[in-house]
Image (tube, grey):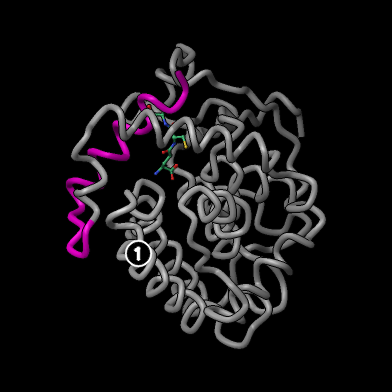
Amino acid sequence: MEKSQVRLHGFWASAFVYRVIWALKLKGIEYEYIEEDLSNKSPSLLEYNPVYEKVPVLIHGENAVAESVIILQYIEETWPDHWTALLPTDPYERSVARFWLDFGRQKHDFFAFFLSSEEDKEETAKQLLETLKIIQDQALGDNKFCGGNKIGLVDLSFGWLAHWLESIQELVGIHILTPNNLPKLHQWTLDFKQEPVIKDNHPDSKALLAQLKRAKMSACKRSHSLPQQFNSTVDLHHMKTVAKNLRKIQHR
Ligand SMILES: N[C@@H](CCC(=O)N[C@@H](CS)C(=O)NCC(=O)O)C(=O)O
C-alpha cells in the first residue's frame, strides 16, 4: 500500500484524532499525518470536511471520511483482515459494539465536567460518574476490554478515559475514575494504557493539561454564564454551543 494513499488530518491534543491513530496503528495501515492549526485550518481540511470543518479527517485515495466514529468503522470495513479485527464478525455482536460507539457520541457529561465551575462541579461529577458506571457495568462487564479479551473499536472510542480524563480530573479537582468508585473501569484504563500502540501514542500529559487549562479559561472568559449552564438538567443545545465556542478558542 502506498503511504500517500492514506492521510490523516489531526490535532495533537484531540482524543477524537487519537482514536483514529490507534486504529490505523493497530491495523498496521501506513499513513501520512497532517497536523492542523485549528485557528487557521488548511484549505484541504475545509475542502475535505466542509460541513463540520473539524479533525479528524481521513483521506483514502480520492475519498475523504469525517467524524471519528465513522472513520473507525470505515477503517475496519476497508481493511477487515489486516493485522487484527477491531469489530466482531457476528452481526449481533457487531450491532452491540455499534450501540456503544453510538452511546459515546450521545453522552456529553464529559464536556460538562470539563467546563464546570466551582459551584456546579460536584453535580457534573455525579452525572459523569453515572455515565461511567453504565460503561463499566454494561459495555465492559467482566471482560478485560469491551470487545472481550482484546482491544476493539469500542475501547478506542472510550480512549479519552485513559489520558484526557486524568488531566481533566486534575483540572477540576475531583477524581471520579478511582479504584473505589469504578474498580473494573479503572483496571480497564490500566490495561488499555499498557497496550503497546496506546503506550506509544498519546499526548504528553503536561502539555495536554496546559492545553486543557488554556481551553477552559478561554471558554469561561468568553461567557461568564457558561459554567452555570451545566447543571443537573444539562441541555444538549447549550452543550453544543459551549463545545463550539470551546473549539473556536481552543487553539489561539
Ligand atoms: N464529532 C467529531 C468531533 C471532532 C472535534 O470536535 N474535533 C475538534 C478537535 S478536538 C475540532 O476539529 N475542532 C475545530 C473546530 O470545531 O473548529 C468527531 O468525533 O470526529
* Of the pair 7 and 174, the residue shown nearer to us: 174
Q: Is mark 1 within 8 Å of ligand 1?
A: no
- Report the residue at 73% width, 42% height from top: 29
Q: Is residue 212 magenta?
A: no
On the image, the x and y values in percent for residue 101 come to 45, 62
Tell me if 233 is positioned left or right of 95 in this view: left
- Report the residue at 55% width, 78% height from top: 182
The residue identified by callout 1 is: 122
Task: Look at the image and tell me in which quarter the C terminus lies.
Answer: top left
Main secondary structure along the magenta-highlighted residues: helix
Q: How dense is the environment of label 1, judged by Cα within 10 Å: few (below 14), some, or many (20 and up)?
A: some
On the image, the x and y values in percent for residue 151 come to 68, 67
Q: Secondary structure at mark 1?
A: helix
Q: Is residue 147 above or below residue 23?
A: below
On the image, the x and y values in percent for residue 138 come to 46, 82
Q: Quadrant of ligand 1?
A: top left
Q: Is residue 248 magenta?
A: yes
On the image, the x and y values in percent for residue 28 come to 77, 47
- Report the residue at 73% width, 51% height from top: 27
Task: Look at the image and tell me in which quarter the N terminus lies.
Answer: top right
Q: Is residue 219 above or below residue 112?
A: above
Q: What's the residue type where badge 1 is placed?
A: Glu
| Magenta-drawn segment | 231-252
Tell me if 1 is positioned left or right of 241 in this view: right
Figure quadrant of residue 155: bottom right
* Of the pair 200 and 122, the residue shown nearer to us: 122
Which residue occupies the extreme front position in the image?
Answer: 118
* Of the pair 245 and 19, the residue shown nearer to us: 245
- Report the residue at 55% width, 34% height from top: 58
Q: Is residue 16 above or below residue 101?
A: above
